[in-house]
Amino acid sequence: MKRLFNFLDIDRYFTIFIFFISYLLIIDSRIKVETDILNVLKPDAPIAQFLAVFVIMILIKITISYIQRKHDLKIHTAKTYLIYFSVSFILYLIISNVFSLVIAALFNTIVRNFNTHTLLLNNVSRMVEFTLFGSIYLAYLFYNENNKFKTEITKYNQALSSSAIQQLKAQLNPHFLFNNLNTLDELIEEDPAKASAFLHHFSELYRYSLITSEKKLVPLQDEIQFAKNYFELMAHKYLGYYHLEIENEHQIPHVFVPPFCLQVLVENAIEHNLGLDKTPVFITISISDKIIVSNNSIPKKYQKKTGGRALKNLATQFNLLSDKNISIDSSDTHFKVTLPFINSNQDV
């Protein structure tokens, strides 16, 4: 029964409500011809009616699943629900009449049960039954889907806002600015060429951040370049203790990813691992049919208590944008995050 409830996307409260409506309809029909209150309240007919409603709901759900799968529908409107109702309605009438015909043939009652008057009355009754209970069920599904969609949009906006705010705070942090301007000042005196390169990466970092912070998706090529600029900026600070390699960089497909996703993983590798001259941290971004960002693990002695929030936000964004999950593999020696591609025709 639980599997059936899961398939129909209903809960016990909705089931009780449907049974209550079924019972009321039977009482209403009996009270007009019965005087004995016990006969009016007998539960046999309401149970039969209740089971018939389940048949209607199963037929509707099968119709919805088939149409969704055939046409790859992800967003449903009132129009699509009207289509579901119409198709299910026609199928219900056909199946009901075929089933009645088979039963009548078995009991040799075709002449009695399939004359014009009886056939008309039976089909009118079926139409009323389907219209009532089918409409209630579809309205219930529409309500649940609308609530689920609103919840997902809220979760996505919260994750996106949190990620964007965290990135902008980190990049616009006064300490971040002060430290990098000090580094720039030192490089101007020591090596003007390095100072020029540092300033270039610094400006590209801010330009990309300001342009993409409000976007849901960005081209993978742009995110790769941003990650490189970010790492080049960090390389001036850590002096060769960290290394970044990008595999298949010239074969990057035209796909989309959430902004800052690669930079977050590069930053994560730097923040949580202690790179030294003799034991550097090697960070690799590999592009194939997916994106794999990996690094050797040299954990710092003291880790931040708030660690992991960026990865959680990243996982939420991918799941909500594409219904795909990121994969995180961690061991004593290596850390790897696998990101799926997002193919998008939307205006990003």
Image (spheres, rainbow, N blue to C red):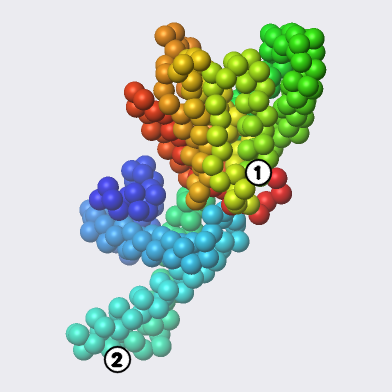
User: In the rendered image, which quarter is residue 327 located in?
Assistant: top left
For residue 20, say whether it is visible: no
Q: Residue type at mark 1?
A: Gln
Where in the figure is residue 73, as x and y percent of width and height? 54, 59
Q: Secondary structure at mark 1?
A: helix
Where in the figure is residue 210, as x and y percent of width and height? 75, 29
For residue 244, say whether it is visible: yes
Q: Residue type at mark 2?
A: Val
Q: Nearer the viewer, residue 211 or 244?
A: 244
Which of the numbered marks, if any, corresponds to residue 111?
2
Q: Nearer the viewer, residue 262 or 30?
A: 262
Q: Nearer the viewer, residue 4 or 202?
A: 202
Between disc 2 and disc 1, whose residue precedes? 2
Residue at 46% over, 29% down: 295
Rate crowding at label 1 as few (under 14), some (14 to 19) or many (20 or more) other CA atoms within 10 Å.
some
User: In the rendered image, which quarter is residue 243 located in?
Assistant: top right
Which of the numbered marks, if any, corresponds to residue 221?
1
- 106 sits left or right of 126 in the view: left
